Amino acid sequence: MPRRELLTEQQRLAFSSPVTDERAMVRYYTLSALDLALIDRRRGDHNRLGFAMLLCYLRFPGRVLQENEQPPAALLQFVADQLSLDPATFSDYAQRDPTRRGHLTEIQACQNYRPFSRMLYREFAAWLLPTAFNTEKGPVLVAILLEEMRAQHVICPPLPVVERLCGEVRARAQRQLHRKITEGLSNAQREALDKLLTIRPASGQSWLAWLRQTAYAATPGNFPKLIERLQHVRAIGIDLERAACVHQNYW
C-alpha cells in the first residue's frame, strides 16, 4: 500500500520558502545590533550580504540556504537595505560554497544553532505525540513541529524527513487510540462491532452508515426510528460513554 502523503506540493513549497510580505519580513528578518556586529566582521560586500541571508533563512523557514540558491528579490532587497548594500552583490556569494559552509559553522557556534540528529528525531517525536492525539491533519503537525524546531534553534532537516517524523507519530497515536478504545472488549463485542461494517438488509448501506446518519427531528413520527437505532447500539454491549470520551480527547 503506498504511503499516505501528509503534504501537497504547494504546501511543501510554502513550508520551505522564506516569507516575502513586508510585515513578516520585519518580524523575521530585522537584523539586531548583535547581528550587524557579526555581519560586519565579514570581508567584502558579497560576504556580508551572504552571511546575513544565512541568518535570515535559519530564522525562517528555519533551514539552510542551499548552494546556488537565489533568495526572493524582495527579501534580498529588505536585507541589503539594512546593510546599505547592493542586492546584486549576492550573486558573487552564491557561487562560493566553501565560504557558505564556513559561515554556517560560525553561525551555529555564535548563535547556538544545532544540526538535526537521530537523538533529536526521537525527542521531537515524543514531544509531538500528545499533539497527534488532538489532530491527525498532516499540515498542522508539520507546522507545529517546524515552529518548535525554530524555537529551539534546531536547523530544520529536509522536508521529507519532517514529513516522515510526523507520519510516524500520527500512526503511533492512531494505534494507541485504537488500543484504548478496544481494550477490555469481549470477543462477542468485537464480533458485534465487525458486523457494523456489513450491509443492512434492503438498504444498500452498512449498519455503521445507518447509525451515523443525521439525527431525525424530534417529532412523534420519528421516535420509532430513533428507538430502533438506540436498541441496536445497546445490543452491541459497549460502554459508549467511555468510547466517546476517548474519541473526543483524541480529536
Image (spheres, helix red, strand yellow):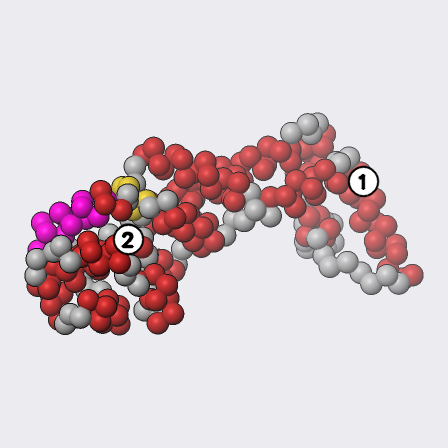
- Amino acid type at mark 1: Arg
Report the disc number at residue 58.
2
The verdict on residue 95 being magenta is yes
For the residue pair 221 and 151, the one nearer the viewer reads as 151
- Quarter assignment of residue 35: bottom left
Q: Secondary structure at mark 2?
A: helix
Name the residue located 30 percent from the left edge and 62 percent from the top edge. Answer: 29
Mark 1 burial class by Cα count in 10 Å: few <14, some 14-19, many 20+: few
Which label lies toward us, 2 or 1? 2
Residue type, numbered disc 2: Leu
Q: Residue furthest right?
A: 220
Residue positioned 15% across, 70% down in the render: 85
Q: Which residue is mark 1?
A: 234
2 or 1: tag closer to the N-terminus: 2
Towards the viewer: 197 or 251: 251
Q: Which residues are magenta?
A: 94-108
